[in-house]
Amino acid sequence: MPSAQFSDTIRTYHRYLGYFLAGIMLLYACSGVLLIFRKTTFMKFDVHYEYQLTPGLSVIELLSTLNVKGLVAESETEQAIQLTMGNYNKQSGLTELTVKEYPLVIDRVVHLHKASTKSPLFLLNIFFGSGLLFFALSAFFIFPPNAAALKSGLKVAVVGFAMALLVVTFG
């Protein structure tokens, strides 16, 4: 049985970590909601790009060089290649693309969820995940083992875990 001092210490850490993580959770919640709409144009606007590429590229070379997600060649003539998001002039190499992008700040927030080890944001993701793990586990040490709040909290936690498992499995 944890001592009262241990419970108070855990409660203090839990409280201040909760306050600290509240700001990070706000950003993650917003980026999570935006990612639901990532395949739509919600909150995106058109950005026009012009590239000077090597003249005479084939469709495969062009798509490989541009490396834009969802970019497809629609048609090809001797002078140009028509793309889903623009066109490429085979004689001059001039390529014009119009893509949908988030505004800079929103784009940065959305990349929180997409961060990999190649991005410095992965450190924030590791810290945030570790903080949430502590936050979730420390909730069970705030109350004494015989407290009614702990027993009902354990039941709610089991229901939440089961629901998340069902949604992940069958969703």
Image: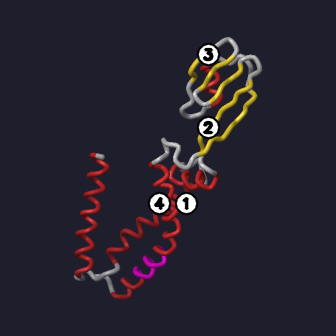
Q: Is residue 115 left or right of residue 153?
A: right
Which one is nearer the viewer's eye here, 59 or 130?
A: 59
| Residue 132 percent location from the top left of the image | 43, 65
Which one is nearer the viewer's eye here, 150 or 104?
A: 104
- Tell me which corner region of the image, top left, top right, bottom left or bottom right, holds residue 51: top right
Q: CA distance from mark 3 to mark 1?
A: 46 Å
> Which stretch appears magenta?
10-17
Helix, strand, or loop for circle 1?
helix
User: Which label's residue is closer to the chain start, 2 or 1?
Assistant: 2
Relative to residue 96, is residue 10 depicted above or below?
below
Residue 75 included in the magenta stretch of the image: no
User: Which label's residue is closer to the chain start, 1 or 4?
Assistant: 4
Q: CA distance from mark 2 to mark 1?
A: 29 Å
Q: Which residue has dot 2 on it?
A: 99
Q: Which residue has dot 4 on it?
A: 29
Q: Is residue 34 left or right of residue 143?
A: right
Q: Which residue has dot 1 on it?
A: 124
